[in-house]
Each structure stands twice: as C-alpha cells, then as structure tokens.
Amino acid sequence: MNVRLCLASVVAAGLAAAPAHADDEGVEKGSLGLGIIIGEPTGVCGKLYLQDDQAVQGALGFTFVTGGFHAHADYVFHPWILEEREAFTLPAYIGPGVRLLQHRAGRGADDDFRIGARAVAGLLFDFKEIPLDVFVEVAGIAEFRFGSNDEAINGFGLALNGGLGARYYF
C-alpha cells in the first residue's frame, strides 16, 4: 500500500511541476514518462526529465534470476546523441543510482535484503511523432547484503542488471 501511495505521489508531482517539451519538429511531450521494463527487473518504470539532457528514472518490479522484489532510481545524463533522424533521436545515457532488493532465496535458504550503488548506461530511442521512448540499458551494482542467518552470504557483492522497456510521456 505504501509503495502505491509513493508512486501516485511521484506521478502527481511530476504532472503538476514538470514542464512539457517539444522535440525538434515533433510532437509536444510531457516531461514524465511511465511504462514497463522487461529483464532484471521486470515491472513498471518511469522517467522525469529535469532538463533536456538530465533526468531521474526508476523502476519497481520483480527479479526472476536472483528472485525477489527490486526497486531502483538513477540520475541520468544524456551527453551524446548518436543519431538524429526525422522520426527519432538516439541519445546514449549514463548515470549513478541506487538499488534495493528484497531477495527471496526459496527452498529453505535464507532470504536477505540488499542495498547498492548502481552505474547505469543505455540507449534511448526517443520518437518525435509520438510521445514514446524505447530504451535498453545495463547497470553494474556494488551492493551490501545483510539479514541472512548464513554469515557467508552477508557482506559486499557485485551484481548486474539489464532491461528493455518503453515509456509513454504525459
């Protein structure tokens, strides 16, 4: 219930505060995009543009490889435009972030909680004629695991996330 309330608050704040922007010769787009992500995690995602080349993005979902509930947020920069076409723009993005994971071990193993720093990089297909983008990204994570009764599992670890998604802008 609290997750839904937080997500609804973020959406309402984004719609109220985020100015609309228009792509070159394209449709006017809002600054808040909501959609889906498939991969690690699989769930819902969002992106809020703060400037044309900076945004906050995040996702809530489930991880099927590691097992559990995943939440992450990133501050991303779009420093390079790799391609500019009539129908779309192809910027690359990079940035730091944070990930939280409630790991569900299953089969009698101990569950644990993980918190970590993310370094994300991706490509964004930003369509000009419709308020939609499609993205592919990968993130390296340096995390701390705790909460397990097995002391060998607790402590520092590394992880990798990747996903493909789409967002519609309001």
Image (spheres, rainbow, N blue to C red):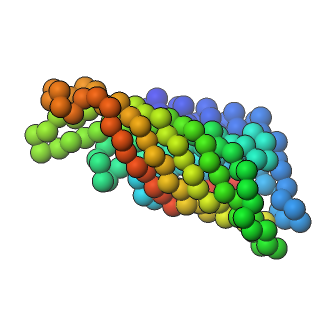
Look at the picture and state if 42 lies above or below 127: above
Outermost residue toward the bottom in this view: 86
Residue 136 location (% of width, % of height)? 55, 60
Q: Quadrant of residue 89?
A: bottom right
Viewer-closest of 70 and 74? 74
Whether residue 76 can be seen here? yes
Residue at figure coordinates x 76%, y 36% from the top left: 16
Nearest the viewer among 98 and 47 is 98
Residue 1 in percent (x, y) is at: 44, 32
User: How many tags in the picture?
Assistant: 0
Q: Residue at x 75, y 39 (%)?
A: 50
Percent position (x, y) of residue 12? Answer: 67, 36
At x 62% / y 56%, what residue is drawn? 167
- Using the rendered image of the protein, determine whether residue 69 is visible from the camera's viewpoint: no
Q: Is residue 41 left or right of residue 35?
A: left
Q: Where 119 sits versus 153, above or below?
A: below
Kindly give the residue lying farthest to the left in the view shown. Answer: 108
Residue in the foreground of this view, choosing between 56 and 81: 81
Residue 130 image position (x, y, % from top left):
74, 66
Point 79% across, 47% down: residue: 52
